[in-house]
Amino acid sequence: MLSCPLHQHSHALLLHHRPNTAISSSLRRTHNSKSTSLLLRHLSQPQPQPQPQPQDHAAPAPTPLDEKEKVEFLELSLVTKRTPQFPGSIYVQSPSDPDVHTSLPPLQTLFQTHTNGSDEEQEEEDHDLIMRALEIRRKVTAEIFKESMIRKGKFGITYATNLTRRLSDFIDYVMVEAAAMKRLPDFSESTFNFRAKTVIDDSRVVPLIRWLKHNSVSYPKIGKLICMSRGKIESIRRVIEWLKSIHVKGEFLGVALTKSGRNILERSNEELDEIVNYLESNGVRMDWMGYVVGRCPQLLSYSMEEVRARVGFFLDMGMNEKDFGTMVFDYPRVLGYFTLEEMNEKVSYLKEFGIGTEEVGKLIAFKPQLMGCSIEEKLKPLVKYLYYHGISRDGMKRILMSKPIVFCIDLETTIVPKVRFLQDIGIRDDAIGNMLVKFPSLLTCSLDKKIRRVVIFLMTRAGVNEKDIGKVIALGPELLGCSISKKLEVSVKYFLSLGIRYRQLGEMIADFPMLLRYNVDVLRPKYRYLRRTMVRPLEDLIKFPRFFSYSLDDRIIPRHKILVEKQINLKLRYMLACTDEEFDKKVEAIVKRRQRFESGLLVDTLSEAALLKEDLSDSQATDDPVESMKLSESESI
């Protein structure tokens, strides 16, 4: 609808082109009797007579209208048939108003240009006027559609306005259809507004919008769907009903329709059922189908030949139906988002790490997100960075096979800050590479919520000093993956309860960082056996914390029984930190030396006596070799 200043300006233009009689008849009030009587009294007063014009001079030509005035007249001609007027208005704002159609000049006389212009300029100006008229008609159609949504669909004005702005293609469709209806006999005399309303009502688009909104489809997706339909509105309802039949829910209904391509609305239900049945026959369960289609709707736009080719690409790498189905459910985009050429390139790149075809198939089935990693933007920069820190191809293969998600995370924002932190706490660059190969999960742990907190805990609660913290993390990077409350704190409390001092515990951890990773239920019987059965002092455990790393039933108890039988006492280090053959040889050598002593043979050299003393434990060895031998004879554990 035109604003009041526009109407006032149009009225001024009409006054300029009308005779005085037309002015008096057109300015009569029709809305208020008192105002009308006052106006008639004013008009009945004598008016000054105009000066007579010489008859030998022709009347002056009307002043040509500028571009702004032309556009205003054009808008005036294309608005609705009757422009609403406020009570008391004296301005006639529509050509359909009484006493106006005979006075308004035709449009052809309003847009006359100078005759001295060229034909090309005339054509260009005509084209501009036509495009302006078309844009005005488009705005009128949009207003009609918005009014239908508000009155018939009971939508709010904000929702109707926002949705109408996204329906430019459909508005053009309504405008073209309404113009074409002019040729039909039943609508030859009807107005454009009536024909546009008829097109909107016949398409049943307003009830469809209400239904889509009820099915949790947002108005941007509704706008895109209606424009995609190209006037075939009912196809949207049909496809959505089919999507709901395969368990696509909520907002994914709109996602599946808008991202599956334009041809989805043109495909029959039978074609779509064929795709779904084929996926089900290859391991994708039907109750997973809605999740898969909702997150990879591109599948619905492919032909059956292409779907078979994509499924065969993975099955040819040795995947069975179970692995294929779980892979598609875990990462639906792996099946339909990438081109076959891209997938072949990524598989070839993974084989360069020395992985076979079947191993690549198992790797992708386990972590299909690898197919979503760009070779140039993600994989190659990461490989170059790992190589810089001394990780060989075999090391990268180990990382890839044990923790493939490392190759999917961002290098600059995730990996580089963690490596910098490790360098800051004193770990050498060559040791960082070994850490990553040994414990690739380090790169997936949060720097602030996990790694930094574990380091602070070790330094403040476990007694590890600043100079040893780098050594501890380098030797035991698995500590960074342990829970502080459920694992580390429980272990620290247990060791302190044994009488181990705070700084002693820190030295034990620096010597053997994995000490804190053992379950307390596993440590407790070993400690009990050491103190009660072996009768060893706590100092022996502090000097050799690796004692807890050996099996109680397979190594500690059998070797202790042998020492008891042979009446030998060894340090824990010499007792446990060797193979069975080395242990047997060591015990046999001690027995032979003792036999030589018992037979009366003197110890030949002091070096042999020193060797014998080293074999004995710190708690019972003395400085006198002969006395030590006597202690060894009388030892009974």
Image: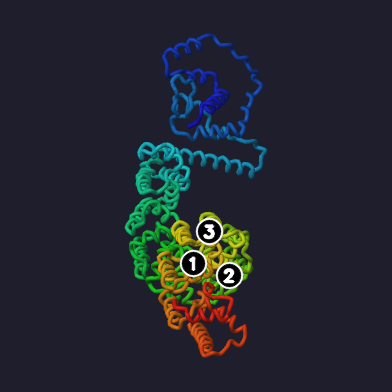
Residue for point 64% across, 18% down: 53
**Label 3 residue SS:** helix
Q: Position of residue 21 (x, y in %)?
A: 52, 18
What amino acid is at disc 2?
Asn
In the picture, the disc for residue 538 is 1
Pointer 3 local density, CA inside 10 Å: few below 14, some 14–19, many at least 20: some
Q: Position of residue 508 (x, y in %)?
A: 53, 65
Residue for point 56% across, 11% down: 47
Residue in front for this viewpoint, 630 or 503: 630
To which quarter of the image does residue 395 belong? bottom right
What amino acid is at disc 3?
Tyr
- Which residue is label 2 attached to? 434
Structure colour scheme: rainbow
Tell me the quarter of the image containing the C terminus: bottom left
- Which residue is label 3 attached to? 502
Q: Is residue 305 visible?
A: no
Residue for point 44% across, 32% down: 81
Disc nearer the start of the sequence (3/1): 3
**How far separated are the C-alphas under marks 2 and 3?**
30 Å
